[in-house]
Amino acid sequence: MQNHTFGIWHVTNSTIIFFSTFGAVLLCGAAVFHLFAQNRMLRQRMGAIQDHTSDILRDLTHLRLCVENTSDGILLQDLKGRILWCNNAYCDIMKVLRSDIIGRNPLEFALPDNARLPPEVIEAFEYDKSDEQLKKLQLFRNQRGDGSLFWNQLSVAFQTGSDGRDYAILICRDVSTQVEREHYLEDLSGRLEHEATHDNLTGVPNRAAFLDFIETALKEDRDGSVGLLHVDLDNFKTINDTHGHSAGDAVLRHTAQTIRSSLRKSDLVARIGGDEFVVVCLGSESLDYLEAVGQRLLDALSTPLTWSDRSLLSEASIGAAQSEAGCMNAEDLLNKADFALYEAKRSGRGCIELYDAALHNRHAIEMQLAADLAEAIDTGAIDFWFQPIKNLWNDQIVGFETLARWVHPDTGRVYSPAEFLPVVEDIGLLGELDMISMLTALEKKASLAASGFPDMRMSFNASPELLAHPDFINRLIWAVEASNLDRHQITIEVLETNNFGDAAETSSQGAIIRDLKQAGFRVFLDDFGVGFAGLSHLATLDLSGVKIDRSLVSCILTDDVSFKIVRKAIELCNDLSIAIVAEGVEDETTAKTLQKMGCSLIQGYWVSRPLPASDVVPWLAEDSAPRVRIS
């Protein structure tokens, strides 16, 4: 072995080999270490890639779950509207196969048959991404593959893909149930609104709608050009009583349609109650114009209605009033038309009356009269007179009827019941007046008993308002018992023309009459022979007697028909064992004729005119007074 000396170092060959080998090992170790480091970094990077890929795959899985299982249809389209992809829900909604629609525009197959577009329009279609309307939810009526229709709610979004192209993403939803429910609610709301403002029977506006309409018209009226016609059917009650309420309903519908067809589109017809209609004429020039319109309506309504093989004729009366520029409300105008209608009724019906200056003056007088009457009733200033009733068989006075009289405090004029009772009824005080009449009759009955006439009967008139008073029977019984009077000597007279209703109904007038009879009072049907259901009332009401109206009695000597009617009425009442009183007997011959017919009780000027309360006892006391004998 060789030795080499290099300065202080003594190096052998083996030493050199050792250091050479050791250096190589070091170099190799460094390389391996570097390789391990790179491998570790690579593994880390691969792990990160795997994690990212896993996230992407998971997101894609979730996305697929959502897209394929949502109930909303999803479309991917190009800007020409051609379908590039769709989910299963869209195919289910449209009832189509995916293979049949890829590459097609939905405009080709989704529109209903009656809304299909020409091919050239579909070909020219292209989305406008700047269209603000596309950013909103849109609703379309679409057609499925099976031909059924549905409501399709669409939303559109635009997105640029990685390829740089623009795409349209559509979300489709079948909202038919919601839309149909909304339509139902809208329809229901419309029907409820219509019912609130229209008459259910005739379909024309009701009173509330009329008032809204005319109030608005009058507020905008600058030249007095609003006209009002108040139309009232003349014989509607006869139709109801004779043919039934179905016939009456048919007449009301016919009347509404007839009036509507006779007017301009700008005019309004409304039913404000019962058989009453009003017509508002906008742009009415004058009362002459309203008269022409009213006459046209009267002519149209004079044509009979054929119903169930019957001819129903219901003519009308009309009152007309014209507005005054800027100084009238609906109530004032309606009151004027009402008064004109009242004049038409008094003039014989079937005509039109205009609220002109002359009628205005008369209206003012009657309004003052109504105010004076109201004060008279309130202060007890109404007088009551008494008309005797005579028994023809024993020549005796058997009772009195209580009649109201009113002496005007300023003019001193004496008003008969026929003159002022309609006014009292109009102001709603008839029931109150009848209550006063009832108490006055009972007081007079007690006075006659104290004066030596204990068996004298006393009668008073009971209006529907009095019969409907909740305390009527109780107050009657209390007053009778307080004065120790015989109930059977008290007679309540009710008009034949009343609507008594069904006696089975506890609140009906027929039931009130039954209760009066059961309580021991007598009930007579007054003015028998002039109403429309007198014979029916005899069959359905618990009556004690009838009073044959003076209009028939006064004609029995000169009119053969009246003679026969009265004779048959007397025979019928005798067969039914109910009493008969003949009114309006003014001469001995009439009295004799009635007696031969079988009538026992009469009243009229031949017996005596109505007597003031202070004259009754002296008149009864006179020997000659009750001794008007038939020779």
Image (cartoon, grey):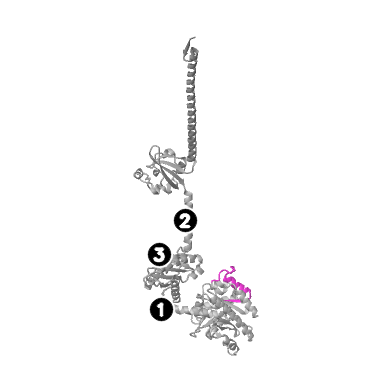
- Amino acid type at circle 1 is Ala
Q: Which residues are magenta?
A: 499-524
Quadrant location of the C terminus?
bottom right
Q: In front: 338, or 571?
A: 338
3D distance between C-alphas at marks 3 and 2: 29 Å
Check disc 2 and report the residue beneath it: 186
Check disc 3 and report the residue beneath it: 261
Check disc 1 and report the residue beneath it: 358
Find numbered disc 3 in the image and state the secondary structure of the residue it sits on. helix
Q: Is residue 619 left or right of residue 172?
A: right
Q: Are marks 3 and 1 in contact (CB under 8 Å)?
A: no
Q: From the viewer's perspective, is residue 342 above or below residue 408?
A: above
**Considering only order in the chain, which callout, 1 or 3, is on the residue closer to the N terminus?**
3
Between circles 3 and 1, the one closer to the viewer is 1
Q: In front: 61, or 477?
A: 61
Specify the farthest residue to the top. Answer: 1
Between circles 1 and 2, the one closer to the viewer is 2
Label 1: how many Cα within 10 Å (few below 14, some 14–19, many 20+): few
Q: In front: 305, or 208?
A: 208
Residue 561 horizontal/vertical position (percent): 49, 77
- Amino acid type at circle 3 is Ser
